[in-house]
Image (tube, rainbow, N blue to C red):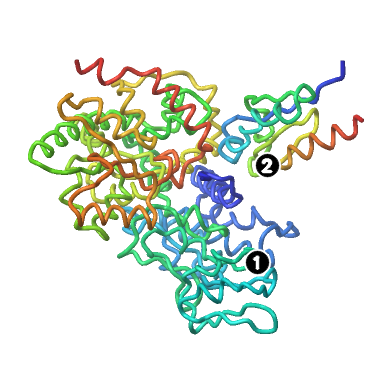
Amino acid sequence: MEKKISVKVCLGTTCFVMGSANLQELIEMVPKKYGEKVEVTGVPCLGLCSIDWEFSKAPYVKVDEDVIKEATVEKVLKAIDDKLAAMN
Amino acid sequence: MAINTPKQTSHLKREILVRLIRAFLSDDFAENARLIPYDMRPKGHEVPYRCCIYKERAILRDRAVAGLGHSIEETDDSELLSNLAEKALERTQPDEKPLTVLTTACKGCVPSRIYVTDLCQGCVARPCVNTCKFGAISVINGKSVIDPAKCKNCGMCAQVCPYQAIQKIIVPCENACPVGAITKGEDGHAKIDFDKCISCGKCVSACPFGAVHEKSQIIDVLKNIKAGKKVIAMVAPAIMGQLPCTPQQLKEAIQELGFADVYEVAQGADVTTKTEAAEFVERLEKGAEFMTTSCCAGYNELVDKHIPEIKPYRSDTKTPMYYTAEIVKKEHPDAVTVFFSPCVAKRREALQNPNVDYVLNYEEIGAWFVAVGVQVSECGESKFKTEASAEARNYAVTGGVAKAVQTLLPEEIPAHPVIIDGLNKQSIRDLKKYAKNGMCELGNLIEVMACPGGCLGGNATVNAYKPALKQLTNYVNASESLKSTEK
C-alpha cells in the first residue's frame, strides 16, 4: 500500500480569520479529486502563526511536512499535484 | 451566485486591523500605529501589488486611517498616523458616514462602456449593426466600431454578437451599487454620494482594489474596555456561523476580550417575530394586500431614501437590534452597548438608536481574536442567560424572517412569502412596482434582505457561505422552536 499524502488545513482562529475559512472546500474537494491517494483534514492551530508577526502569512496548510504560507485552494492543489508527480 | 469569494483585499484589511489593535494594546499606541505601513513594507520588501513600495505604504497608511475610524476624504494627507491615533482616542461619537473611499487605492477604472474586442470577425450577418437602435455601430476595415458619441451603453450589441466579441467594460463599484450612489468623480476616482447611499456594503465587497473601507469603531470600543466600563456585546444571529467554535465558546471568547456580557440579538428577533406576526394579521384584516419585513437596515435605508411610496406597506415592527438593545439598556442602564454586525448598514441604524453605542463587524472581531491570540475552539463554554428560539437564530438566512413570522400566524390568515434575496436594480424595480400597484401578485409577505443569502452574505462576514450556513443550521436545529414555547 502506497503512503498517502497528508493535507492539514489549519482551522485555528488566526488562519480561519485570515483566510482558511475559504479553504474548507478543500475538505470536500480533495477526496473527490484524488480519492484514496490523499488524506485531508481540518486541524486545530498548527502553531505557525504565533511566531513573531507570522500571522500575516496565515492561512497555513501543511502538505506532508511542507508548510504552505498564505495558502489558497490553487496553491494547495498544485502542491498535491507536485507531490504526486514526484512519487510516480 | 458567488457570495464571499476569497479576496487578498480582505487579508490586507484584516491585517491592518490586527496591527492597529496590537498597537492600541502596546505601551505606545501612537508610535506603533505610525509604524504600521513600515512594518508591513520594510526596506527591501517585495512589492506585491502596486508600482512601488512608497505607494504601497501610502495605501496601507490610508487603510490604517480608516481602521482608526477617520474619513480619508476629510483627513489631510500630511497628517501622521500617530496624530490620527491620538485623535481617534479623543472621539466621543462615531462618524455619520460609515464608509470612506481611499483615493490612493482606487484604480480610477476606465469609465463603463461597450467595447469591441479583437475577437470581432467582421461577419456578414452583422447583428450588432442591425440591433443598435442608435446607429452607433459601423464596420470599418472589417471590424465593428462603436461611435462613443452615439452609444447609449445599452449593451444590446454585446448580447447578439455570435462571437461574444463585444464586451461591456464595467466599473465594479458602480456596477455593484443598486442605487447609483458610488460613481467616478471628475478626477476619475470613486466617490460616494451619501444622500443616495443605503450602506448595503456592496461596493466594499466589489472593489478589486479594496478602495472602499468601513470606518472602524474598534479603537472606540477598546478605549471603553480599557477605561473599565461595563461593555456589553450584542451579537447578530449570523455570527454563529462565522468562527470555528460553538456559540457557547464564542460567548466565552468575547468575554475574554473584556466584554462584561454577551446577548444574542436573536433574543430581540423573537420580539420582532411576535410583533410582526401580530401586525401582519392586523394589516390583512384591515384589507392590506401585502406587507414587507423591516429588519434589514440596508432595505430600511433604501425605503427611506429611494422608495418612500412603499413605506405604508413596510412593517412598523422594530428590528432585532432595537429590541435587544432595549432589553440590555433596561437591565444594565450603565452599560456601553456594542452591536456585532455582518454588514455596514447596521452602523447607520445604530447611529439612529441611542441604545446602541457602537458597532463592530465580524472582520473586526476576528482581527481582535487574532491580535490577542484567543483560540476560540479552546475556550470554555458559557451559556446565554436567555435562550432564543430556533426561528430567531435563523434570521440570518434568506427566507428565515418570513419563516419565523409564518410560525406564529393563525391558520385562517396564512402568509404567502415572497423572498427578495439581495437588493439589485431589478429587485428595486420590483419593489417599486408592488408599491405603485398596491399589491404583489406573487404573495403577501415580502421578506427583503439586502445581501444575497441573507446576513450570512454580509460584506463583513469572515466565513465562506456554505460552511457558515451549515454551522448556523446545526445551531438552529439544536434550538427550540417558537411553536413549542408559544403554545
For image coordinates 48% across by 33% down, the residue present is B242
Find disc 1 in the rendering and name its residue: B54
Q: Amino acid at mark 1?
A: Tyr
Which element type, helix, strand or loop, lies under badge 1? helix
Q: Quadrant of residue B392?
A: top left
Find disc 2 in the rendering and name its residue: A72
Query: Neighbour class for label 2 at 10 Å: few (<14), some, many (≥20)?
Result: some
For image coordinates 53% across by 28% down, the residue present is B244
Q: Position of residue B412 (x, y in %)?
A: 15, 26
Q: Which numbered tag is attached to residue B280?
A: none
Q: Quadrant of the C terminus of chain A?
A: top right
Q: Quadrant of residue A45?
A: top right
Q: Quadrant of the N terminus of chain A?
A: top right
Q: Amino acid at mark 2?
A: Thr
For image coordinates 67% across by 56% down, the residue present is B41
Foreground tag (1 vs 2)? 2
Q: Position of residue B487 (x, y in %)?
A: 19, 15
Q: Is residue A88 above or below residue B168?
A: above
**Do the residues at pointers 1 and 2 share their chain?**
no
| Marks 1,2: beta carbons within 8 A | no
Q: Is residue B128 above or below residue B403?
A: below
